[in-house]
Amino acid sequence: MALKPTIYKANLNLVDMNQDLYCSEKLTIALHPSETETRMMVRIVAFALNYDTDLSFTKGLSTADEPDLWVVRPDGSIPCWIEVGQASADRLRKGVSRADKVKLYAYGSEVDVWWPKHASDLNALPKTEIFAFDANEAEQLPQLCERNMELTVTISEDHIFVTSDKGQVELKLTTLSS
């Protein structure tokens, strides 16, 4: 019998000082059985970094034809395709062929090994931006994780502060390719 995802709820308060954006969203996030809480929390941070009224989480890990998040307009156009982790060039090519812009948010201790191996292939992709979070900082995100979370994400330049009643985690976003 297949394992079912664990459902998390988050009240997200977003303060994006780079865009002068202040809003609140109620999110429902499915944690896939093979996904870590760190990855799920990075998806929430990616949501905050790319906030749009049409931005949504997808089936992600359970389907090869959808990214982790995307913006789909009512007319079916896809302005933004967002992946989390260390995606392959083949996976990002799917986004390049369907969306106006593709973004990848890499995280984890393997990024320093993964990026040099894949940089030339990924840099060759048009319409693609690649970012990375420091592994040690991202690994602190699960300490804020609860099945029902009240999160505030504050974005100022390339610094992201994720806060809950359990504490705060500061993330620095590094641009690998733009």
Image (cartoon, rainbow, N blue to C red):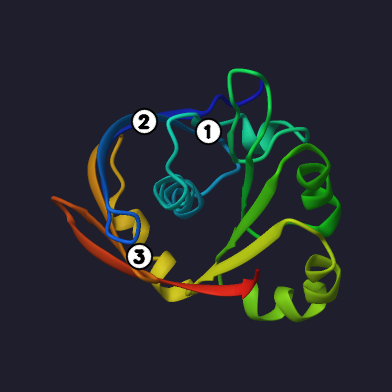
Q: Quadrant of the N terminus?
A: top right
Q: Earlier in the sequence, mark 1 or mark 2?
A: 2
Measure the alpha-carbon separation of dots 3 and 2: 21 Å
CA gap, disc 3 and disc 1: 22 Å
Q: Are marks 3 and 1 in contact (CB under 8 Å)?
A: no
**Helix, strand or loop at disc 2?**
strand
The 10 Å Cα crowd at callout 3, few under 14, some 14 to 19, many 20 or more, is some
Check contact, mark 1 vs mark 2: CB within 8 A: yes
Q: Position of residue 119 (x, y in %)?
A: 78, 75
Label 1 crowding class (10 Å Cα cut-off): few <14, some 14-19, many 20+?
some
Name the side, left or right, on which 84 lies relative to 24.
right
Q: Amino acid at mark 2?
A: Leu
Which is nearer the N-term, disc 3 or disc 1?
1
Q: Which mark is residue 140?
A: 3
Tell me the kind of residue under disc 1. Phe
Q: Nearer the viewer, mark 3 or mark 1?
A: 1
Tag 2 or tag 3, which sits nearer the N-term?
A: 2
Q: Secondary structure at mark 1?
A: strand
On the rendered structure, is 79 left or right of 154?
right
Kindly state the secondary structure of the residue where label 3 is placed: loop
Q: Is residue 158 above or below residue 14?
A: below
Q: Disc 3 vs disc 2: Cβ atoms closer than 8 Å?
A: no
Return the residue at label 1.
57
Identified at 42% across, 43% down, the residue is: 51
Mark 2, residues whose alpha carbon is within 10 Å: few (<14), some, or many (≥20)? some
Nearest to the observer: residue 59 or residue 69 = 69
Residue at x-position 83% and y-position 49%: 93
Q: Extreme left residue here?
A: 165
The residue depicted at 52 percent of the width and 28 percent of the height is 5
**Residue 27 — which label?**
2
> Residue 80, position in %: x, y?
62, 42
